[in-house]
Image (spheres, rainbow, N blue to C red):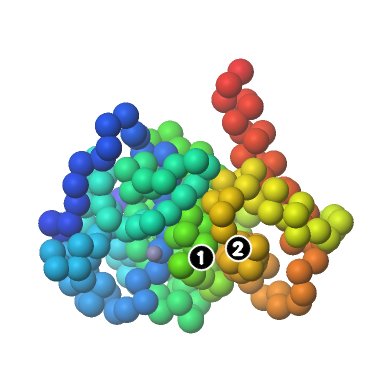
Amino acid sequence: MELIKHPSPNYGLRRKNTEIEFIILHYTAMSTEKSLKRLCDPVHEVSCHYVIDPSGICYQLVDDRKRAWHAGKSYWRGYHDLNSRSLGVELVNSGNEKYPEAQMKSLIRLLKHLIESYKLCPKNILGHSDIAPSRKLDPGKWFDWKKLSIGGVALFPEVSAPMECDKQIFLTQAKRAGFNPNTKFEHILKTFRNRCRPSFTGEFDGYDCALMKKFADAFDIDDSSNSQ
Ligand SMILES: [Zn+2]
């Protein structure tokens, strides 16, 4: 796919014995011009591998093999240094608006290419809020995970019936999926709702529990098949 090179000096080496396993999705919360400037400014010490603007233009800032600085303090399935194990993709979006069709198409094309290149599992395409639920909201409730799932490049759990509504069950399943077990219930519920039930605003319920179980099951099923 067509990439515009826009090199950033903000990167380092991946930690020893790590490989690219995850892709972390973000929104920039600023314009394309400001995003590119900031992600290439040595003063700010932030970067990512790819930036996709609302029209679908994709910029490459950091070589895939290098460690870009986008995840910050984060956790997923026992890993703390997600920067060493991931590629970061920034989407130009304020966080309060729909992601345009052209941008989503370009993202899906990029993800397909990266999943194929590095033999990644679609379940390992995560949002910044999944790996840092107590401090990050991106890619936020306007991001269409279902569209990604239909494109075969992410998980989007769906259930037809609720389970018992129980906070402890919800948290146990969240931990099984990969969320940091030290995260507050409210933060996990918020990030998970943004991902799976973005328009739902009701009280915590049995559908939240059923969806989290379905989400966690997807990780366990794949893991057991890998070990066979
Ligand atoms: Zn982010």
Q: Which residue has dot 2 on it?
A: 184
Q: How many marks?
A: 2
Q: Which residue has dot 1 on it?
A: 134
Residue 58 vs residue 18, the one in the foreground:
18
Residue 21 vs residue 50, the one in the foreground:
21
**Ligand 1 lies under 8 Å from the Cβ of mark 2:** no
Classify mark 2: residues with Cα within 10 Å, few (<14), some (14-19) or many (20+): few
What residue sits 48% from the left and 55% below the top?
131
Pinpoint residue 46: horizontal percent, then vertical percent.
24, 62
Residue 102 vs residue 18, the one in the foreground:
18
In terms of secondary structure, where does tag 2 sit?
Answer: loop
Task: Describe residue 74's horizontal placement relative to residue 220 as left or right.
Answer: left
Tell me which amino acid carries mark 2: Lys
Q: Is residue 3 visible?
A: no
Q: Quadrant of ligand 1?
A: bottom left
What residue sits 23% from the left and 77% below the top?
34
**Ligand 1 lies under 8 Å from the Cβ of mark 1:** no
Residue 152 vs residue 172, the one in the foreground:
172
Evaluate if marks 1 and 2 touch, with contact meaning CB atoms under 8 Å apart: yes
What residue sits 57% from the left and 25% below the top?
226
Classify mark 1: residues with Cα within 10 Å, few (<14), some (14-19) or many (20+): some
Instruction: Estimate the spatial distance between the alpha carbons at disc 1 and disc 2, rounded to whole Å.
Output: 8 Å
Pinpoint residue 165: horizontal percent, then vertical percent.
83, 60
